[in-house]
Image (tube, helix red, strand yellow):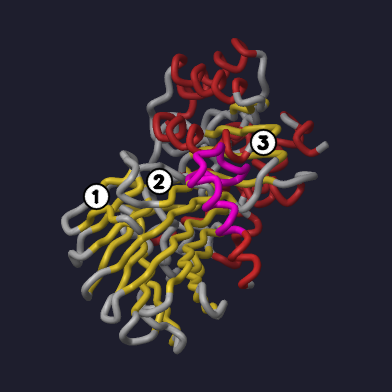
Amino acid sequence: MLLVVLLFTMLCRTSALENKPLPKGILYNKVLNNKAAYPELQLAAGSQYTDVGLSITAPNSLVRLNKYYSLAERLIRYHVSFSKDAVGVFQTDQGDLKAFVDIPNKKIYLGTNPVTEKRVDFLDASHEYTVEVHRNYQQSKLRITDQKTGKSAEIAATMDGGGGVGAGSVGPGFFVGLQHDYYCFGLSSGSSILIKQICVMAKETNLTLLLYGDSITEPEGYFPTADFPSSWTQLIMKNIKGKSMASGRGGTTIVQVLDRIKNELPYVKSKYVMVTIGTNGGNTEENLSEIVEYIKQQGSIPILNNIPSNESGSQVPVNEVIEKVRKKYQIKGARFDAATSVDQNGKKVDNTTMYFEDYDWGKIYHHPNVKGSLQMYKQTLVNVPEIYK
């Protein structure tokens, strides 16, 4: 473990210090000091650059890395030193995941309910550490490695979705968070922490398929863990000959997808890029064309899917625009509206293919369940079989 950490750290540090192009899979990499500018880092009160790193001395203020990522297989790695009374926090701007390194109490923990924690007796403020926060679909993991001794410890927690909402819930679930949206770090309590280097990396590169979208493409947020392997994204990726990855983010539109894809695709590379977007509105012929052209510029083959059917029927006009753009560029896409509709005509949602979300303000059917996921996967076999070859 120590050798792997040291080799990777040397690779990242060399590229950062010499201002070389990032190695494939490295999304961001900077060694921090007061000799350069880092406009992508939004500083908070009590933080300043020094000769040896970014010093943070004010508790409860966060530094933010202003790079938007949603790859479901990624990690961020920090080179850190702590004061003897420091509790460092490594989280996201939405606060859905908070990971802590507690030096005085010699433990690491995740801010779940109940807290997920582990005692780490080797924590010593006189040593420097590599702190990693991993994302692997429903699982988040915190790992810390002593750079002097090579000792390491880690804890992990797995998101367990409730399926639907209210009367549609299939279980209580367990909330861990999906690391939305921007990495942040700071001092939870104590005197200081010093961040010497930050590196963000994807866990796979040279993909066959990379999937982008909103919550439809992020079933890890609502699928029960036991059923998650049967979600449509997992079914597709399981049957791809080669490596694949998803990058979904619930509640977003094509505007956010365009932002994320520019921070991820050039560094990951993929033969095919599949986009399923529009359930939350925002699609236009212009921005759909922009994303298709960007994917092509990166040397990838775009696949633009119809969005699934939903209770309001809003997929019909959305898919008309998507189909127009597909014809414009002579590209393919899966008819997920047909796969999730009565009579497979893309008009009226088949409620049995969706989780039921029972809110005070309405009853929603637009997140595919196990049945809907299987039918969506089968639809790709009809419309885009080449991705499996």
At label 1, counting other C-alpha atoms closer than 10 Å, the crowd grade (few under 14, some 14-19, many 20 or more) is some
Residue under the point 70% across and 41% down: 206
Work out how far the residue at label 2 is from the one at label 3, CA to CA, in angstroms. Answer: 34 Å
* Element assignment for label 2: strand
Front residue of 335 and 29 = 29
Give neighbour class at mark 2: few <14, some 14-19, many 20+ (Cα, 10 Å).
some
Q: Which mark is residue 270?
A: 3
Q: Give SS at disc 3.
A: strand
* Local crowd size for mark 3, using a 10 Å CA cut-off: few (<14), some (14–19), many (≥20): many
- First reached walking from the N terminus: tag 1 or tag 3: 1
Contact (Cβ within 8 Å) of mark 1 with mark 2: no
**Residue 12: in magenta span:** yes
Q: Which residues are magenta?
A: 8-28
Q: Residue furthest top?
A: 328
Which dot, 2 or 3, sits closer to the camera? 3
- Residue 251, how many percent across, how many down? 38, 42
Question: Of the residues under marks 2 and 3, which one precedes in the sequence?
Answer: 3
Residue 295: quadrant of the picture:
top right
Residue position for label 2 = 364
Kind of residue indicated by mark 3: Ser
Foreground label between 1 and 2: 1
